[in-house]
Amino acid sequence: MNENYTNSPLSDDDGEKASFVELVTTFVKEHRIAVFIVAFLLVAAVILTVQGLNKTDYEMYLMYCGPAYAASSAIYGNIVESAANACRDGDYAPEVAFSTIVYVSDELADYYIKEGIEYNGAYNAEALQNFDYALAAGEYCILLLDRSLYDDTKHLNVFVPLADLDIDTEYAYDEYALELSKLPLGDKKGFDSLPEDTVLVLRKKSFIQSLFANKKQINERYEAQVDFFIALTK
């Protein structure tokens, strides 16, 4: 590599810059979450402050990330209602905050391109970035994920093992995820409109939130998410 730069019309400074870019690119690819965490430390304070100024009465924080347009009126409202009913205790049912991110896997993107189906690569990259933000600093802990996205993410050690929750693994995809289509929840309105390969997982508590918010409140809210997650699996 050095020999190529020696014979190149580029100056030494240009060669150093090119090498630095390569190093940074490689580092980002190999340390995806670590890089985003550094960025989150800069923006999380602003995000969490805004969230604090716009307080709601939401109790359950549920997110879907996958190819289905779950924000459509035919899916969104039904998922919110079905999730609340699944966690109902007598007259009490939690207020559900449901967030959606449309993300297309590489395999599905290749199919879209081959079949001439509209696909925006830049939008998809932004969707993946938003998902990484949610993993590192968001309030959403109960996640419905495209299986390929889950497979690409589980090595980051951000999901709670099912064994730690004493959940029956009859419907398990692996040690962290449950197959939505096999759960009773998968037959409920809204949830039955999601792709069959969708998995249900519980994200670990975000330590970044604890840096900028009331730690006791964060802990209590997270424990509530654990209880709701368990209720959704029954």
Image (cartoon, rainbow, N blue to C red):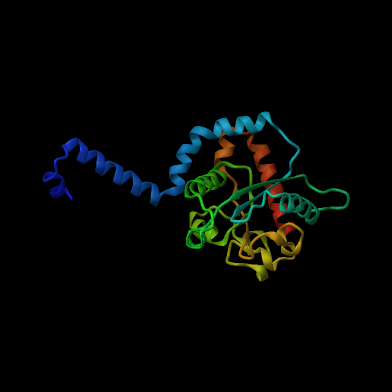
Q: Which residue is at 47% across, 46% downward?
A: 122
Query: Picture quarter containing residue 20?
Result: top left
Name the foreground residue: 94 vs 147: 147
The answer to whether 57 is drawn above or below residue 89 in the figure is: above
Q: Position of residue 52 (x, y in %)?
A: 66, 31
Can residue 216 be seen here? The reply is: yes
Residue at the extreme right: 91
What is the total number of numbered labels drawn onto the structure image?
A: 0
Q: Residue visible at 74% across and 53% down?
A: 74
Q: Give percent across and percent down for residue 171.
A: 66, 68
Using the rendered view, name the quadrant where residue 207 is placed. Answer: top right
Of the 4 image quadrants, the one containing the C terminus is bottom right
In the drawing, does residue 123 fall left or right of residue 55?
Answer: left
Query: In the rendered image, is residue 163 in sight?
Result: no
In this view, the residue in front, 102 or 219, is: 102
Q: Is residue 120 above or below residue 154?
A: above
> Residue 104, how many percent across, how many down?
54, 55
Residue at 69% x, 31% y is 54
Relative to 12, 135 lies left or right:
right
Taking the view exactly as shown, the residue that stands out farthest to the front is 116
Q: Is residue 51 above or below residue 145?
A: above
Q: Residue furthest bottom?
A: 170
> Is 13 situated above or below 140?
above
Q: Residue 135 location in percent, x, y?
A: 55, 47
